[in-house]
Amino acid sequence: EPDTGEYWGFDADLAEDLADSLGVDLQYVPTSWPTLMDDTLAGKFDLAACGITITDARKEQALMSEGYLVNGKTIICRSEDAAKYTDLESINKPEVRVMVNPGGLNEKFARENLPDVTLIVHDVNQDIPGLIAEGAADIMITEIMEAGYYVGQDERLAAPLINEPFTHGELGVLMPKGSEDLLEYVNAFLEEEKRSGRLDDLADEYIYQHQEEELAPAA
């Protein structure tokens, strides 16, 4: 939250739970999508949990936990434009301005699947929803999890395709090789979070609560 400096959301709550389970204080370390893997391998932090999709490429370089949340690529747009965008074909036009953060899977997805759009790369990911709402671009490529949060925070935004994501994957916790003991602990922790219903509760709170009211407004 910019006003308080506190971290809020699915991953933040999950990280707090993990820190409590380990009996340690949680410390946040800044990173970015372009530097995420380098920062992980350099040991700048013990683990990363910030909407990181499990991929073979990441598993070749580092350790990744079992998945804790099904996720996928979707869009956010201005509420008044929600009816325009029904699939990739309706987005993939030169007059549609798509804004993404650099160096991550959002940019990769846009370049591979939306070759005809006007692509705008903006360095600060959390700025993009506000820029969409203000008209600086038309579409943000993001994950289901982020879409639920952003739309819930700003009534000017909509996520009309959140129930029909373009891709399907799982989020996991990233850590450097050599952290096998921590990986084993994290996997056991995540299994207990699933078993207890905690992960479902977090998903309801931060992702799905806005689907009926906010994410798919009537055309």
Image: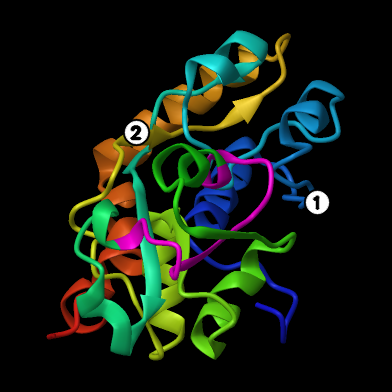
Nearest the eye: 215 or 112: 112
Residue drawn at the location 73% of the way across and 28% of the way down: 37
The amino acid marked with disc number 2 is Gly
What residue span does the magenta drawing correspond to? 91-107
The amino acid marked with disc number 1 is Pro
Residue drawn at the location 45% of the way across and 63% of the way down: 94
Nearest the eye: 208 or 57: 57
Query: SS of the residue at dot 1?
Result: loop
- On the image, which quarter does residue 190 sit in? top left
Task: Name the residue beneath numbered marker 2.
Answer: 169
- On the image, which quarter does residue 67 sit in? top left
Left or right: residue 108 compared with residue 45: left
Q: Position of residue 216 (x, y in %)?
A: 19, 76
Is 193 within the magenta? no
Q: Residues within 10 Å of mark 2 (few under 14, many from 20)?
A: some
| Residue 30, label in figure | 1
Asked whether residue 144 is in view, the answer is no
